[in-house]
């Protein structure tokens, strides 16, 4: 373990060089599973952010001219390096973020797949050529990189949320300034070193870790040469960033909060629904914006669904993510655990019952037991607020209309899940849910080949799929006059 931490770079990465922060300051990164310090890393200052912008702006022109195949090959090599080093990358992720090694390995593969996908997209940036309807001219439509981008990534998926922004930016020919999360910055620093090894030229990717997001974001977005920002994080912060992009009209991709409904109809395959529920709830310890936040179950099967889900959740082993057989690690922080304690307390005060769990673990590390709450009444905060923890609140519905109404009764619109054996209903309800994504008889929608993103307060823009690269390309049209012969 010490070896992994010892090997990773701990400075800022600007213009292809590892360097201390402008004032030499550092901050500590801790293991949430035992609250021990892992290491100290450079604490970026505004001057560092400005230097990163200069590097990205300087590199932009030649990077945009680099042939798409060459850009794609760099991503492909990075994909291969990540795959070869999956175990080591997973260990580092578990140490800084807490999730089990099995989950971290799955994230490394998920993250690497974004590089593979976008290595293939780099060479398929196409355009259009057409004769004007009235004759006498041609229309050529082409697409160009938007320019230097600011990418702000969250702590919950330390690698995958980076690669799904960096992958399309590299493929499109954009340079970048990345602000990694304060709580889990190590995987991103390591990724910068890996991308350099894969051949990424100096200045294309700049990484500035910091204890202050505003110290980095303000000077970067204040510079009109930076043309785009992509953010994954809370709706509250997303709203502020949208305002900050207004003066320079920078393009934005906003992947924000969620409050995913999970619908189980009476005709569902209950085993599949319970398995899907565990996946949708417990992936990443529940700390995911696509985590099922609330379960709405048809009355005739609610008792049986609750019994089976309780049994599965009670059987999950909780512990430090590096321990053999553990599937539930700690939450990221004391504050995050307090929020879960508060939401469960509120639901219980209003009459809900914990059929398993319902409490934190004593001792070091921010652990909270996998929990199922039944009989959760309508006014409970846990049905309205994003839980970001291993708690499954269950309510019931009587018919399809009520299920759809309950599912859509939120300001958020990232994802919804539904389980039914009736194909007509699956399509009908899938189309009716006011969300950017729907899982039908599955608890997992995340897929590098599909467009990930939400509507309403869950943001806008898509990551992954063919749509993912569009976010980093501007459309340009050339009007060509063609005279008669
Ligand atoms: C997120 O929680 O922000 C993203 C989860 C995913 O890509 O599956």
Image (tube, grey):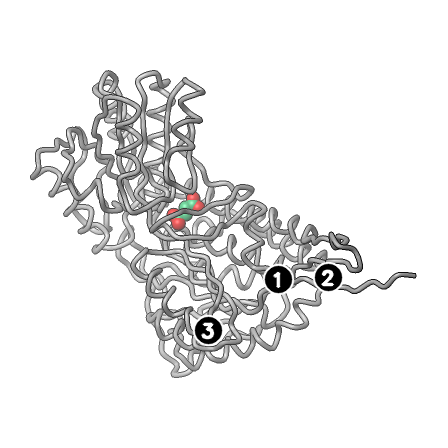
For label 3, the crowd category at 10 Å Cα-Cα, with few meaning under 14, some 14 to 19 and many 20 or more, is some
Nearest to viewer (mark 2 / mark 3): 3
For label 1, the crowd category at 10 Å Cα-Cα, with few meaning under 14, some 14 to 19 and many 20 or more, is some
Quick check: marks 2 and 3 in contact, CB under 8 Å? no
Mark sitting earlier along the chain (1/2): 2
Q: Tally the numbered discs.
A: 3
Q: Position of residue 75 (x, y in %)?
A: 62, 55
Check the picture and name the quadrant holding the N terminus: bottom left
The residues tagged by marks 2 and 3 sit, at their Cα atoms, a distance apart of: 29 Å
Quick check: marks 1 and 3 in contact, CB under 8 Å? no
Nearest to viewer (mark 1 / mark 3): 3
User: Of 11 and 66, which appears nearest the observer?
Assistant: 66
User: Of 450 and 366, which appears nearest the observer?
Assistant: 450
Check the picture and name the quadrant holding the C terminus: bottom right
Query: Can residue 324 be seen here?
Result: no
Mark sitting earlier along the chain (1/3): 1
Q: Position of residue 2 (x, y in %)?
A: 41, 58
Looking at the rendering, which quadrant does residue 321 occupy?
top left
Q: Position of residue 479 (x, y in %)?
A: 72, 64
Q: Which mark is residue 248?
A: 3
Residue that carries the numbered disc 1 in the rendered image? 197
Looking at the rendering, which quadrant does residue 301 occupy?
top left
Q: Residue at x 50, y 61 (%)?
A: 190
Q: Position of residue 265 (x, y in %)?
A: 32, 21
Quick check: marks 1 and 2 in contact, CB under 8 Å? no
Q: Which mark is residue 67?
A: 2
């Amino acid at each position: 373990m010490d070896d992994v931490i010892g090997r990773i770079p701990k400075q800022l990465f600007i213009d292809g060089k590892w360097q201390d922060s402008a004032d030499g300051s550092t901050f500590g990164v801790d293991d949430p599973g035992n609250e021990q310090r892992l290491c100290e890393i450079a604490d970026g200052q505004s001057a560092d952010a400005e230097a990163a912008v200069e590097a990205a702006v300087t590199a932009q022109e030649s990077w945009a001219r680099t042939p798409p195949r060459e850009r794609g090959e760099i991503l492909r090599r990075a994909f291969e390096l990540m795959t070869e080093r999956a175990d080591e990358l997973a260990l580092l992720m578990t140490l800084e973020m807490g999730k089990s090694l099995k989950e971290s390995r799955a994230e490394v593969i998920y993250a690497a797949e974004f590089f593979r996908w976008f290595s293939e997209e780099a060479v398929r940036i196409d355009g259009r050529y057409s004769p004007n309807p009235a004759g006498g001219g041609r229309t050529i439509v082409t697409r160009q990189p938007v320019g230097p981008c600011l990418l702000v990534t969250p702590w919950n998926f330390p690698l995958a949320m980076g690669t799904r922004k960096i992958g399309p930016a590299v493929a499109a020919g954009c340079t970048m300034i990345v602000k990694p999360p304060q709580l889990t910055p190590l995987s991103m620093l390591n990724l910068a070193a890996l991308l350099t090894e894969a051949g990424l030229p100096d200045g294309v990717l700049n990484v500035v870790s910091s204890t202050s997001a505003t110290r980095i974001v303000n000077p970067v977005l204040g510079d009109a040469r930076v043309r785009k920002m992509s953010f994954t994080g809370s709706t509250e912060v997303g709203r502020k960033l949208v305002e900050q992009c207004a003066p320079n009209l920078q393009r934005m991709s906003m992947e924000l909060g969620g409050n995913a409904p999970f619908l189980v109809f009476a005709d569902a395959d209950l085993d599949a629904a319970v398995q899907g529920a565990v996946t949708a709830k417990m992936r990443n310890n529940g700390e995911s914006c696509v985590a099922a936040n609330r379960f709405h179950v048809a009355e005739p099967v609610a008792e049986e669904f609750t019994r089976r889900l309780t049994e599965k959740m009670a059987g999950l082993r909780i512990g430090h993510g590096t321990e053999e057989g553990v599937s539930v690690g700690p939450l990221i922080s004391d504050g995050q655990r307090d929020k879960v304690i508060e939401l469960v307390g509120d639901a219980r005060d209003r009459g809900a019952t914990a059929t398993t769990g319902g409490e934190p673990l004593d001792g070091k590390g921010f652990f909270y037991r996998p929990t199922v709450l039944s009989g959760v009444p309508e006014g409970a905060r846990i049905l309205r607020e994003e839980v970001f923890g291993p708690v499954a609140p269950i309510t019931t519905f009587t018919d399809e209309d009520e299920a759809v109404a309950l599912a859509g009764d939120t300001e958020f619109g990232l994802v919804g899940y539904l389980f039914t054996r009736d194909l007509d209903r699956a399509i009908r309800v899938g189309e009716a849910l006011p969300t950017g994504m729907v899982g039908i008889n599955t608890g997992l929608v995340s897929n590098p080949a599909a467009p990930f993103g939400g509507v309403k307060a869950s943001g806008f823009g898509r990551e992954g799929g063919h749509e993912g690269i569009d976010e980093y390309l501007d459309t340009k049209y050339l009007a060509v006059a063609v005279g008669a012969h």
